[in-house]
Amino acid sequence: MKQLPISGPSLEPTRGACSKCALREVFLPPDSSASEARRLDSLVLERRQIRRGEALFQKGSPFAAVHAVRSGSFKTCIKTWSIGEQITGFQMAGELLGLDGIGDDVHRCDAVALEDSEVCIIPYGALEEMSRESAAFQRQFHRVMSREIVRSHEAMLLLGGLRASDRVAAFLSGLMQRQQALGLSPSSLVLSMSRQEIGTYLGLKLETVSRCFSRFHDAGVLDVQHRHIRILQPEALRQAGASLTDRFQGSS
Amino acid sequence: MKQLPISGPSLEPTRGACSKCALREVFLPPDSSASEARRLDSLVLERRQIRRGEALFQKGSPFAAVHAVRSGSFKTCIKTWSIGEQITGFQMAGELLGLDGIGDDVHRCDAVALEDSEVCIIPYGALEEMSRESAAFQRQFHRVMSREIVRSHEAMLLLGGLRASDRVAAFLSGLMQRQQALGLSPSSLVLSMSRQEIGTYLGLKLETVSRCFSRFHDAGVLDVQHRHIRILQPEALRQAGASLTDRFQGSS
DNA sequence: CGGTGTGTTGATTACCGTCAATATTAGTGG
DNA sequence: CCACTAATATTGACGGTAATCAACACACCG
């Protein structure tokens, strides 16, 4: 296996207020004031560039800050002696990293950049303080944590209840939705992760993932060219991976 | 499928301060003062008895409070049209229910009592308020949420990376540890959930769960008699389900 | 232009799911 | 208290899905 060095000397961080970057989506309620935006900016004292393959933090390293992905993308994974690794999530721009560390002041997983990326560093102490001062902000932070819980419960559903092809379909649907939320093309996407990594996330082997892509391709649902994916029949995908998007109660 | 009515007219709630019940373990740091304990008690205005099979809350119902299991046990599950149900966790005495609801002010899963149970009702508003007043309490609450995130990440590991028998072993190891944390016998336990439910949690069919129990029984690792389990070789179990308990980094 | 990492495809196998029959328990009412 | 029923659990035979092993194709990089 490769080493995953904690990233070396920083590249040049970009400039610009965080209240205007994706962080706004995470922390500011839709109807927030200018003063709240200023406060939000004051949280982020520092940014950091991480190169592809480097670790933002690793399991066991002390927890001090939450990170917001400003650009690029990450995977979070648990490595074990017996299994290898389980990927617990992929994070793209505007999403948070490191909430797992609050529990014991120590990170419980690795966070590795899938491409050259930049994160905003939000010191946890400052976050706590601001939560105490502003009820609105507190609420928003709790929402973020709660949604992460729901998200991983949905991942459990995916792992526990779906056949291979449906997992892949649900995975792609999810990526699509997140891209769309960022204002990017909803039908065309470039995967920043390998088949191996998708498999590790979905509880499948890379060959199985590859076969699923091929089958969707043959069926005319997707146009697959390595990591470039175009969704030709979004409806067919949603149907295959219906479990995560349907909000029905199975009564009767 | 059975109906899961929101529980009817309450049974008689028990008396006694919450700072002395299992809730203490959850919310009070080890070195907490008496005044903090009093404050904690002030959070819980009400208790509620839930009968076996009844729902404490259901997906879609408005979120207003977090619940702490005082006695008995629960399952939380997501029901979908296509899959049936995925159990996202089992909660026993001293554990929290309902954190999923904070995100959108609506519960995202059902919580159903596995046996006659009692919960403490902690209004979320009061919890927010106390979090703003006491940094120590705030920290503790964040810890609880964070640990729930880590817990479900570990569940993903289990679902994605382990063979059937190892899932069952890890599941039993986990139950054992939690029993032990409550000061109960670490070697003997009575399952409050059916094989079906264990299977639904572990992403397996009930027959597979049953077979695993039988194989462990034959191997002399467990003494299985329906829902009464005695662990004869804890070491063998831990070894089979090593993934969740090992804290190593897979380097080199 | 090789070489390495990544992805695709095929053949075979192992594990778990499915279907089905039986056993055991708990819960109910005589 | 016992008989009866429904729910839960065990066990077996069989089949399907995904893992494994292996060969090959393709891009990206020096």
Image (cartoon, coloured by chain):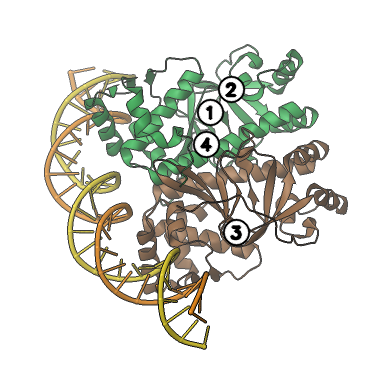
Chain colours: A green, B brown, C orange, D yellow
Residue A140 sits in quarter: top right
Residue A48's disc number = 2
Q: Which amino acid does label 3 sit on?
A: Ser
Distance of mark 2 from mark 1, alpha carbons? 9 Å
**Disc 2 packing (10 Å; few <14; some 14–19; many ≥20):** many
Q: Which amino acid does label 2 sit on?
A: Arg
Q: Position of residue B103 (x, y in %)?
A: 62, 34
Distance of mark 1 from mark 3, alpha carbons? 45 Å
Task: Determine the secondary structure under disc 3.
Answer: strand
Q: Can residue A225 be seen in this view?
A: no
Disc 3 target residue: B73
Disc 1 target residue: A7
Q: How many labels does the image show?
A: 4
Mark closer to the chain start, 2 or 1 = 1
Q: Where is residue A89 in the image (x, y as percent from the top left)?
A: 48, 35
Q: What residue type is labelled 1?
A: Ser
